[in-house]
Image (cartoon, helix red, strand yellow):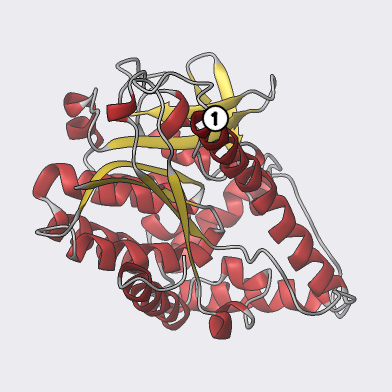
Amino acid sequence: MTQIAIACQGGALHAAFTAGALKTIFERLDGGPYELTGLSGTSAGALCAVAGWYGLLTGGPAEAINTLEAIWADFAAVTPTEQAFNAWLVTSLRLQGYWLAADVRFSPYAPFFPALIAQLRLAGARPEFVDYETLLEKHINFNTVRELQPVSRPWLLIGAVNVLSGDFKAFSSQESSPDDNITAAAVQASGAIPGFGSRAVRIGEEIYWDGVYSQNPPVRNFLADPEMAADKPDEIWVIQLNPTSRRDEPKTVADIQDRDNELAANLSLGQETKFIADVNGWVERGYLPADQYKTVTVRTLTMSPELSETLDYASKLDRSRSFIQMLMADGEKQAGIFLDGGAG
């Protein structure tokens, strides 16, 4: 069987596409030609990766699909308060992008920020809508996760960055230390973007921000960390949310912001995949021992162009159910094409 690892790029709410793609992939795992040896993710890609990984460990592919569906259903704006807040936020961002409203930014450490969250709760927002940790722990039993670790297959990696040192961090299910393995705090750290209202997450003596600033997502670890060639995947499937290219020059504030965000998100991914390409070249030239290294194929699964071209920066914060369902449906469709030998 072909051994595969799946790497899930971060992209905020666009990662609902990743959830849909993983659902289709998991549906075909049983009896298929692939063995899943690893998952990695950053930011909302980490949410998808940990949900799928946890489901696979506790109940197999069917449970992984159920966990992904449940966690994204709860992530959506459900109550009238949540829907109104979501519509206000997305509309405000779009107006700012076209200079029709002031660009107002604030620190997540501002004293009024906790009061805003409290007011949302009093107005009818669910705890899992306003608190990421509550969402995670509702669907993933991290006590069970702690008892299961260290886990080598499937191996899970969650990307983050150390705020003070700038060092890249890949929390790993193969580690036994709570400062290094998979915890709710590690998943939170991977999605902690200060510009989106998230404070840095403290784990042990260190503090972390979103992995978009480091490995988006972790890829090279699948090749660099295992000592023997037999423990490395044959293929790495990258679920990429941010388009590599655009047809037109961005000129409006909104379009410039959108393209700037895409390029930044893809920068680390390009570095990760270049490392794989470099190692493949060294293997082919005989520079590396055959028992420790092998050529690894990188395949990329992306959104349909029809959907990708309609998305903007503001849509990365859109938690409306219809938008999430549309992204998930496209993920399921594109993964089917990918598995049937289409693009990628």
Q: Nearer the viewer, residue 280 or 60?
A: 280
In x, y percent, where is residue 55? Answer: 19, 49
Q: Which residue is mark 1?
A: 285
**From the viewer's perspective, is residue 56 above or below residue 82?**
above
Q: Is residue 138 visible?
A: no
Residue at image location 63% in from the left, 66% down from the top: 243
In x, y percent, where is residue 279? Answer: 54, 32
Query: Is residue 122 toward the left or the right of residue 272 in the image?
Result: left
Q: Is residue 3 visible?
A: yes
- Give the residue at the far front of this rendering: 285
In x, y percent, where is residue 224? Answer: 47, 25
Residue at image location 47% in from the left, 79% down from the top: 323
Query: Is residue 137 toward the left or the right of residue 30 in the image?
Result: right
Query: Is residue 331 toward the left or the right of residue 231 in the image?
Result: right
Crowding near the residue tagged with mark 1, few <14, some 14–19, many ≥20 C-alpha atoms within 10 Å: few
Q: Quadrant of residue 63?
A: bottom left
In x, y percent, where is residue 321? Answer: 41, 78
Residue at image location 81% in from the left, 61% down from the top: 104
Q: Nearer the viewer, residue 93 or 9?
A: 9
